[in-house]
Image: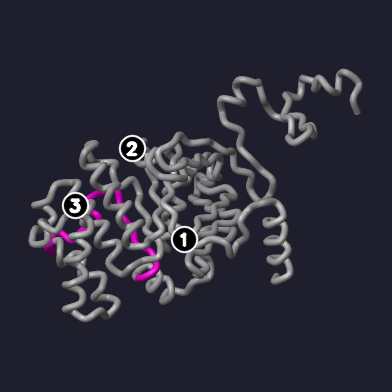
Amino acid sequence: MTTDLAALEARARAAGRPAADEGLVVCDNLVRVYRTEAVEVQALQGLDLVVSEGECVALVGASGSGKSTLLSILSGLDLPTAGRARVAGHDLLTMGRRERLGYRRSTVGFVWQQTGRNLLPHLTALENVALPMKYTRVPRRTRQERAAELLGVLGVAHCRDRRPDELSGGEQQRVAVAVATANSPRVLLADEPTGELDTASGEDVFAALRHANEELGATVLIVTHDPLVSDQVRRTVRIRDGRTSTETLREQGGDGEEFTVLDRAGRLQLPGEYVERYGLRGRVRLTAEPGHVGVWPDRDRPAAESSGRS
């Protein structure tokens, strides 16, 4: 097993892809299948993803593409069917119940889309933020001080003595970010955190997530349909049919450049517009060209081939 892993990582390095120990979050050929008596749904179909410490990454894709399933696995709330998933040194496939509980309390934080799922209704904002620290045995005075500090950093200090029903949706989500970062997690996961908010409130919540990344040191993964979010992070990963299909990288203040992702097995998903434009169906023909690979419909013969080049 050790030899196989070493060989896998050596091939990954040779191919220019990050090896399994070169990211804080690493998913390698991740599979998640849901089965009932009547149907089998493949939510993830061999997904690869590497996220480095300190990144703020947006995960986008159509409904049913597998992005929320991925977040559930990374949060420790769900188990993959096959493949490998590691977060901050934790093997998500082999963790026992006790380790999984500690992982959810200290290594990852989570923000749900539904504002009502993030906060306990009978507690004030300050009490909600302090609560996760109680489970990790932080002294009471320290809990109070850190909770107040987090509310201030995330722009909701004025909410400290209010209960959730006294807060706007945007304020609730910013307090939820404070709750999720209370125990200084290495990774912060957010599933459509601006999905129920207007544009102005969504901007405030994204600013809170950016503060969690830049000032609190959390690596942030955000599932989103919101172009405001995906256009403001440096890296956007698109998931299609349970696999990573493309990535868009942006320089600060500049336009993004989109790349198709080649996974560890050598598979890639061509953008739909290319498939339609060039009539690619079923089998396609590959040719080795100087510095690149040509992809041709099976019915066509490459020009170089038809001109007699071997």
Choose the circle earlier in sequence order: 1 or 2. Answer: 1
Q: Is residue 40 visible?
A: no
Q: Which mark is residue 143?
A: none
Q: Quadrant of the C terminus?
A: top right
- Badge 3 crowding class, 10 Å Cα cut-off, few under 14, some 14 to 19, many 20 or more, is many
Q: Which mark is residue 172?
A: 3
Q: Quadrant of the N terminus?
A: bottom right
Report the coloring of the rendering.
one colour
Does residue 223 belong to the magenta stretch? Answer: no
Choose the circle earlier in sequence order: 1 or 3. Answer: 1
Residue that badge 2 annotates: 228
Amino acid type at mark 2 = Leu
Nearest to the observer: residue 87 or residue 31: 87
Indicate which label's residue lies in the foreground, 2 or 3.
2
Residue depicted at x 53% and y 70%: 94
Q: CA distance from mark 1 to mark 3?
A: 27 Å
Residue 275 % position (x, y): 62, 26
Nearest to the observer: residue 291 or residue 279: 291
- Badge 2 crowding class, 10 Å Cα cut-off, few under 14, some 14 to 19, many 20 or more, is some
Residues shaded magenta: 106-124
Residue that badge 1 annotates: 53
